[in-house]
Image (tube, grey):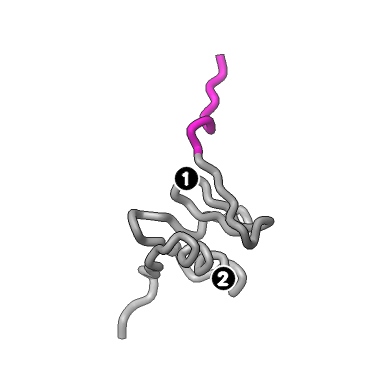
C-alpha cells in the first residue's frame, strides 16, 4: 500500500510570478530553490539571491503582510 506523502501539503501560487514562484506549506520556492520560510508573521530569507529571486521574496512578504528578516546581514 502506497502512502500519499503530499496529501496534506498546501501548495499556492500568487498572482504574480506564477511560473517561477511557489509556496509549499511555509516554504517559499523561487526557480525550484527554497529561498525563504514563513515563521509566524515573519519571512526568514535563507541567503543572498539574484535580483529576480529577491523580487520574488519581497513580493511574498508584501502580499502576505510579513516582516522580512535577513539574518545573514550583520549590523555595522
The residue that label 1 is drawn on is 25
Residue at x-position 63% and y-position 62%:
16
Q: Residues within 10 Å of mark 1 (few under 14, many from 20)?
A: few
Q: Residues within 10 Å of mark 2 (few under 14, many from 20)?
A: some
SS of the residue under disc 2:
helix
Q: On the rendered image, what quadrant is the N terminus found in?
A: top right
Say left or right for 37 vs 56.
Answer: left
Bounds of the magenta span? Answer: 1-9
Residue at x-position 58% and y-position 52%:
22
Name the residue nearer the viewer: 4 or 62: 62
Say left or right for 37 vs 49.
Answer: left
Judged by its main secondary structure, the magenta piece is: loop
The residue that label 2 is drawn on is 55
Q: Earlier in the sequence, mark 2 or mark 1?
A: 1
Question: Is residue 54 in the magenta section?
Answer: no
Q: Position of residue 64 (x, y in %)?
A: 45, 60
* Residue farthest along the bottom direction in this orientation: 76
Amino acid at each position: 500500500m502506497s502512502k500519499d506523502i503530499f496529501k496534506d501539503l498546501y501548495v499556492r501560487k500568487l498572482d504574480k510570478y506564477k511560473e517561477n514562484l511557489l509556496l509549499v506549506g511555509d516554504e517559499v520556492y523561487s526557480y525550484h530553490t527554497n529561498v525563504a520560510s514563513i515563521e509566524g508573521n515573519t519571512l526568514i530569507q535563507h541567503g543572498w539571491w539574484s535580483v529576480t529571486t529577491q523580487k520574488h521574496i519581497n513580493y511574498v512578504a508584501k502580499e502576505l503582510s510579513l516582516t522580512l528578516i535577513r539574518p545573514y546581514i550583520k549590523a555595522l
